[in-house]
Amino acid sequence: MNEWLPEIDQWRARGDQVALATVVKVEGSAPRPVGARMAVSSSGELAGSVSGGCVETDVFTAAQEVLASNEPKLLRYGITDEMAWDVGLACGGTIEVFVEPLSEPPGEKDRAR
């Protein structure tokens, strides 16, 4: 995540909200390990990856919803017979992704005034 902290700082400096998506659980084969992260700005930019591309679009959409509601979400992606045509992981594993609004560091609002 450190490699894209400057991007997050730029987004916040221009007034964007930021959501952070983190892989919190992996079962079986998965493209990214637990701890993989993706940041999403309220203006539609993203940095990082939670799946190497196979569920990023859905996580991006969920992140926009989290920013609008300020309520975190836990997402689960995998392949079952019932969801073969839905968003999932082609590798056959399952991941859980926690999406949360990134709050400002303490004192940040006061410093901006």
Image (tube, rainbow, N blue to C red):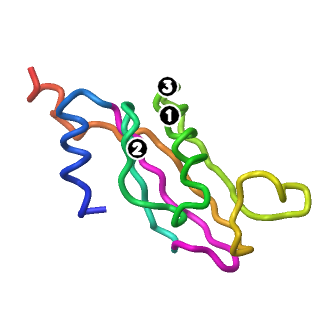
**Farthest residue, direction bottom:** 29
30 or 86, which lies in front?
86
Q: Which residue is at a point 84% across and 59% down the rendered structure image? A: 84
Which element is circle 1 on? Answer: helix
- Look at mark 3 in the image and give the residue it sits on: 68
In which quarter of the view is residue 2 placed?
bottom left
Q: Nearer the viewer, residue 34 or 90?
A: 90
- Mark 1 = which residue? 64
State the mark number for residue 94: none
Question: Mark 1 touching mark 2, by CB under 8 A?
Answer: yes
Q: CA distance from mark 1 to mark 2?
A: 8 Å
Marks 3 and 2: which is nearer the front?
A: 2
Q: Quadrant of the C terminus?
A: top left
Q: Residues within 10 Å of mark 1 (few under 14, many from 20)?
A: many
Magenta-colored span: 17-32
Instruction: Tell me if label 3 and label 2 are in contact, CB under 8 Å.
Output: no
Numbered badge on residue 40:
2
